[in-house]
Image (cartoon, rainbow, N blue to C red):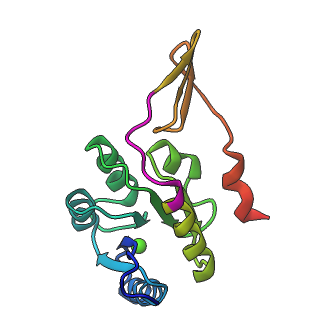
Amino acid sequence: MSGKEERLRVLVVEDESALAEVVRAGLADEGFAVDVQHTGVDGLWAATENPYDVVVLDIMLPGLNGYEVCRQMRSRGVWTPVLMLTAKEGEYDQADAFDLGADDYLIKPFSFVVLVARLRALVRRGAPARPVVLTAGDLAVDPARRQVTRAGQLVRVTRGSSRCWSS
Ligand code: CA
């Protein structure tokens, strides 16, 4: 690979050291520049202080969990794409992750190939400045929070693309 090619910067926040190391080494092999943090507090700090292209965020972290890290990133105006890692299907309401500003998620154990593909897709999609809320009549669509409200009431919507992994 050409050393002049700009490397994508990824932050991995994962408290399981062995998994974090496997992901770090694998992503480095794929040409990513990888930083690893092992706690939510450190992950939040790193994500806020550094211009990453994408963040891999475990949900179950000591202290500050991944949901809270994501929520606080967004509330601080950090819109770096976030891919959340969940321990197992059904343990969490995946809709919660999207409500809190995550862009994608994977269920452990995950395929590394899939992880890389998802990260590249997120980077391609990019991290625009926080999108504006679109309104039409009493309907409001908040792309950043992935929320739709009608007359101030939250409307549950299914994010079709998020279901591709389950087939
Ligand atoms: Ca964990």
Residue pictured at 58% horizontal, 67% vertical? 118
Residue 100 visible? The answer is yes
Ligand 1 position by quadrant: bottom left
Judging depth in this view, the residue of 133 and 97 nearest the camera is 133
The quarter holding residue 37 reads bottom left
Q: Indicate the position of residue 71 as horizontal and vertical percent values.
A: 35, 47
Residue pictured at 55% horizontal, 76% vertical? 116
Question: Horizontally, is 59 left or right of 164 in the view?
Answer: left
> What is the quadrant of the C terminus in the image?
bottom right
Judging depth in this view, the residue of 115 and 52 nearest the camera is 52
Q: Which residues are magenta?
A: 124-132
Number of numbered discs present?
A: 0
Judging depth in this view, the residue of 141 and 124 nearest the camera is 124
Residue 77's place in the image compared with 118, above or below, is above
The residue at the far right in this view is: 167
Magenta stretch: includes residue 131: yes
Magenta stretch: includes residue 16: no
Question: Horizontally, is 163 left or right of 135 in the view?
Answer: right
Q: Magenta region's main secondary structure?
A: loop
Residue 29's place in the image compared with 33, above or below, is below
Q: Indicate the position of residue 126 as horizontal and vertical percent values.
A: 47, 54
The quarter holding residue 59 reads bottom left
Judging depth in this view, the residue of 121 and 83 nearest the camera is 121
Residue 111 visible? The answer is no
Residue pictured at 39% horizontal, 83% vertical? 20
Residue pictured at 45% horizontal, 83% vertical? 27
The residue at the far top in this view is: 137
Q: Indicate the position of residue 85 as horizontal and vertical percent values.
A: 50, 67
